[in-house]
Image: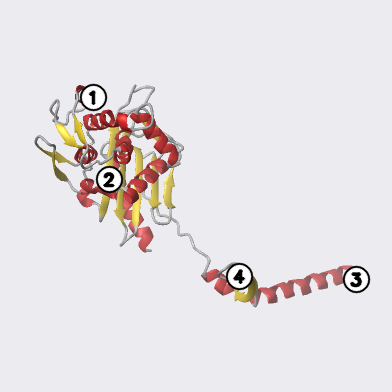
Amino acid sequence: MKPQKNISKILLNSAAVIVVLGAVVSVMVLRQTPDMATPDTSIVTATELLRHTPTTRTFDAPLVGARAVHILDVNSGRTLYSKNADEEYAIASLTKIMTALVAAEESPDPNNHVVQIDAYALVTDGESGFWYGEQWNLADLIEFTLVSSSNDGAAAIAAALTSFVDEPTFVDAMNTKASELGLTHTRFKNPTGLDINFETEPGAFGSARDMSTLFAHVLIEYPELLEATQVQTVAVASLDRLHSVDNTNNIVNAIPWVLGAKTGYTDRAGGNLVVAFEAGPGRPIVVTVLGSTKDGRFSDMEALIDATLTHISA
């Protein structure tokens, strides 16, 4: 029994030493001088280390009907909340975000680039009130198309810009841009997002994370493309006449400090919506919902925006 007592005594003494060390713990931290040339050492207490360790608060997510959700803090690039964010879904008219982006980048001068509404645009599903041969400045047609989610507008943009892109078609240029932006779960098959076949082939598919990333890129690089989507009704003039168009985002007036939005809906895709808003001065947030219902996407978005504001202010 004597050896057991000695072992027990050693273990108890060791434990005591560990407890004492833990109570007065201080950590040697290697710090680099500003030029990273000569390291120096200093004592940092455990309390100081804890103070500078970032904490992660749990996002209190509301119950929503959307199949996929992604909330992006644009400045930090941090995901505040996600649900099935990397799963691929039909994105419907969210496609037009990329249509607008590629057009703005490839046109030599969107404000003075004249686009004519041709027969191809007019036979595209959807009725935007265009006349055959009607002429538009590209920038105004992009504005009209994003606010009203115009399919014939998107078709006219693509037809007019095909000769300006380095790809075989405008849609090829859209997919090249998606690759450049790292949208690994996104693929475009037309400039509108209309389903090619309801059962088997969407006009485009993507993930909620990819859509947040795409929208954030447009918000940072081309914020003027989204300005018209901040209001409920817009008057947009072609070179021939004036058009008054309602925003397809039914809750635009309910979104605090809205920076931009884009809707998407087909029977196959369900209800999609991307919204950018400021959660505080200089604090843009992008929220994406995919695979909700036609009306449910709006209530989902309102609940997610409220939850985001609560999370950030906590």
* Number of residues whose C-alpha sits closer than 10 Å to that of mark 1, classed few (under 14), some (14–19) or many (20 or more): some
Nearer the observer, disc 3 or disc 1? Answer: 1
Disc 4 marks which amino acid? Arg
* Number of residues whose C-alpha sits closer than 10 Å to that of mark 4, classed few (under 14), some (14–19) or many (20 or more): few
Please, what secondary structure does the residue beneath circle 4 have?
strand
Nearer the observer, disc 4 or disc 3? Answer: 4
Name which of mark 1 and mark 4 comes first in the sequence.
Answer: 4
How far is mark 3 from mark 1, CA to CA? 94 Å
Residue 144 in picture, x, y percent from top left: 19, 39
Residue position marked by numbered label 3 in the rendering: 2
198 lies above or below 85: above
Quarter-wise, where is residue 160 in the image?
top left
Name which of mark 2 and mark 3 comes first in the sequence.
Answer: 3
* Number of residues whose C-alpha sits closer than 10 Å to that of mark 2, classed few (under 14), some (14–19) or many (20 or more): many
How far is mark 4 from mark 3, CA to CA? 49 Å
Residue position marked by numbered label 4 in the rendering: 31
Quarter-wise, where is residue 136 in the image?
top left
Please, what secondary structure does the residue beneath circle 2 have?
strand
Name which of mark 4 and mark 3 comes first in the sequence.
Answer: 3
Please, what secondary structure does the residue beneath circle 1 have?
loop
Answer whether labels 1 and 4 touch (C-beta < 8 Å): no
Residue 124: mark = 1
Disc 1 marks which amino acid? Thr
Between 58 and 238, the one lying in front of the other is 238
Q: Is residue 270 left or right of residue 17?
A: left
Residue 309 in picture, x, y percent from top left: 33, 58
Residue position marked by numbered label 2 in the rendering: 261
Total marks shown come to 4
How far is mark 2 from mark 3, CA to CA? 78 Å
On the rendered image, what quadrant is the C terminus found in? bottom left
